[in-house]
Image: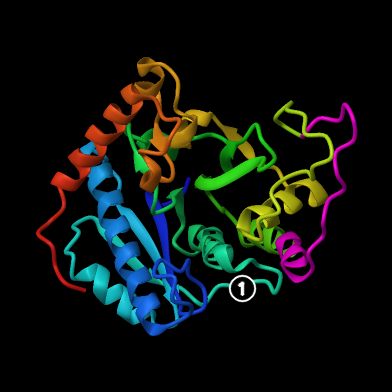
């Protein structure tokens, strides 16, 4: 058994590896805006977990051009229960899309699991937990994530990672390294052929996401190398625009992704109410605002 169990998230801020929230291009001002956004998201994520009475800490892996600045910005928020770790600059492949370059930083979670001898419940910073997720720390089979019934096939916004040996980690990076070095495009699905693990049919579309992000590499690792990823129920990584179900369904969801899109068209009014209430509950727990 690992020495510890904890939640984990990643903050990677680089002038060249961020989603341009200011639409100004790769500038210092844009990088600062991205840092403010990420610090706020970490604070909201931890507040949401605390509001659900988690018994586990939140570890945050920090990397980028100036990791010290990111660490200092998060420390100034005084988030008790948040543990920071500086990590090396991630291996970002040449074929990565501009929009998803920073996503490769989350792959350092596999290294961190072995380094800290810890089973991690990884959450993207734009996740909003709706129910206590501590039980995932006792999950029997790892790594585990949510598979999608669409061409994306899987989403790495929630993962349970427990690397027990150096050999296990080396096997992971041996396979992933080949896919990071060379982009191998899959053949399109043929008529009547089914996407692995989902049963959904997408004739003429490739097997899995080709978004130029970490998920594309993970899918190639699974399909080409036979790497085994175990499946979490969809309720652990629900998307707002798919939450047009009953109020009972919304209340039974464990976590919602893309919290910036809670009011996106297609979300039922009842679900919006549930999500908004949980989001406001998290915001209410934030410490007084401190300038970055």
**Residue beneath disc 1:** 91
Residue 144 percent coordinates (x, y): 57, 40
Judge whether residue 143 can be spotted in this image: no
Label 1 crowding class (10 Å Cα cut-off): few <14, some 14-19, many 20+? some
How far across and down, in percent of the image, does residue 60 sit? 37, 61
Which residue is painted at 33% across and 63% down in the image?
A: 37
**Residue 283 versus residue 77: which sits nearer the camera?**
283
Please tell me which residue lies in front, 185 or 19: 19
Residue furthest to the left? 288
> In this picture, is 273 found above or below 146?
above
Image coords of residue 20 (percent x, y)? 45, 69
Residue at 72 percent across and 45 percent down: it is 208
Element carrying mark 1: loop
Q: Which residues are magenta?
A: 175-195
In the rendered view, tell whether residue 288 sits above or below residue 190. below
Q: Is residue 256 above or below residue 235?
A: below
**Can you say which quadrant of the picture contains the C terminus?**
bottom left
The residue under the point 49% across, 62% down is 112
Is 120 left, or right, of 44 in this rendering?
right
State left or right for residue 246 relative to residue 221. left
Magenta part mainly helix, strand or loop?
loop
Q: Is residue 183 magenta?
A: yes
Please tell me whether residue 140 is drawn above or below residue 248 in the rendered image. below
Q: Is residue 65 left or right of residue 226?
A: left
Q: Where residue 220 sits in the image (x, y, percent)?
A: 75, 52
Rendered residue at 33%/25% (across/down): 269
Q: Between 21 and 120, which is closer to the camera in this rendering?
A: 21
């Amino acid at each position: 058994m690992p020495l510890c169990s904890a939640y984990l998230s990643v903050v990677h801020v680089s002038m060249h590896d961020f989603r341009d929230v200011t639409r100004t291009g790769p500038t210092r001002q844009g990088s600062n805006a991205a840092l403010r956004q990420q610090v706020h998201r970490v604070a909201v994520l931890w507040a949401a977990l605390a509001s659900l009475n988690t018994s586990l800490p939140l570890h945050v892996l920090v990397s980028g051009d100036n990791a010290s600045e990111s660490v200092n910005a998060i420390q100034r928020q005084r988030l008790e229960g948040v543990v920071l770790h500086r990590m090396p600059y991630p291996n970002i492949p040449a074929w990565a899309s501009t929009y998803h370059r920073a996503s490769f930083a989350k792959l350092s979670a596999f290294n961190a699991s072995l380094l800290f001898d810890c089973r991690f419940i990884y959450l993207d910073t734009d996740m909003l937990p709706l129910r206590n997720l501590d039980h995932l720390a006792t999950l029997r089979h790892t790594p585990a994530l949510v598979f999608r019934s669409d061409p994306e096939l899987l989403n790495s916004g929630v993962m349970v990672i427990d690397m027990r040996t150096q050999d296990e980690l080396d096997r992971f990076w041996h396979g992933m390294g080949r896919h990071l070095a060379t982009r191998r495009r899959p053949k399109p699905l043929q008529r009547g052929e089914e996407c692995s693990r989902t049963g959904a049919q997408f004739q003429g579309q490739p097997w899995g996401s080709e978004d130029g992000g970490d998920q594309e590499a993970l899918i190639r690792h699974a399909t080409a190398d036979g790497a085994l990823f175990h499946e979490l129920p969809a309720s652990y990584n629900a998307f707002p625009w798919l939450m047009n179900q009953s109020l009972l369904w919304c209340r039974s969801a464990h976590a919602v992704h893309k919290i910036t899109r809670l009011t996106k068209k297609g979300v039922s009014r009842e679900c919006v109410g549930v999500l908004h209430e949980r989001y406001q509950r998290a915001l209410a727990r934030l410490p007084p605002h401190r300038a970055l």
